[in-house]
Image: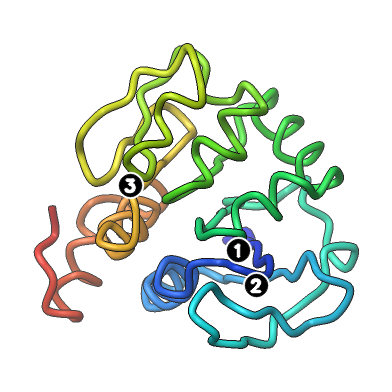
Amino acid sequence: MKQTYVFLADGFEEIEALTSVDVLRRAGMPVTTVSINPGLEVKGAHGVTVVADSLFADNDYSDAEWLVLPGGIPGAPNLAAHEELCEVLSERDERGGKIAAICASPAMVLGTLGILYGREAVCYPGLEDTVEGVNWAQTLVAVDGHIVTGRGPAAAAPFALAIVAETLGQAAAAQVAAGMLLPAD
């Protein structure tokens, strides 16, 4: 199975990033956390500092399974300001590669890059008006083609389970959810 990359920027939403990593690894998916900072340490929006597995320049993203963007303020704006990441995301979208974003990142990163134009997506409430041309849903998670989006912190587990379902099937997602005592839908 190909590598999934979860991008971390100072101010990332801890529950969204770490739940994604945890759930995907429970499903047996290889996951690498990536710091867009100059060093491996990344401080979350609520003061939790994590040490990423790698720096942005350490990886080749061309053959990734997923590129995953947690939200958070200022995490999402920090991701959006990273030009190389934005180039990788745009190129990946053009090739139909899998991208997942949650909370502020669907609007602030994918939306500003035009990746969500004409798609159904969700984001943190109140950010919908910042991007035109997106069919904003009111669900916790939206899947449209090769793009998975999540609404916010409460959607962290369903968001990660949707990524598992898109990769390994609904039965695998249900098995991971059951092991975590979560509903599978």
Which of the two discs, 3 and 2, labels the residue nearer the N terminus?
A: 2
Quarter residue 183 falls in? bottom left
Judge depth for marks 3 and 2 and give the one in front. 3
Contact, CB < 8 Å: mark 2 with mark 1? yes
Q: 111 above or below 173?
A: above
Quarter residue 181 falls in? bottom left
Tag 3, which secondary structure? loop
Which of the two discs, 2 and 1, labels the residue nearer the N terminus?
A: 1
Please identify the quadrant where the N terminus is shown.
bottom right
Which of the two discs, 3 and 1, labels the residue nearer the N terminus?
A: 1
* Residue ID at (75%, 70%): 35
Depth check, front residue: 148 or 167 = 148
Q: Which residue is labeled 1 in the image?
A: 6
* Residue ID at (44%, 50%): 102
Q: Which residue is labeled 3 in the image?
A: 151
Q: Which residue is labeled 2 in the image?
A: 33
Tag 1, which secondary structure? strand
Where residue 106 sits in the image (x, y, percent)? 49, 39
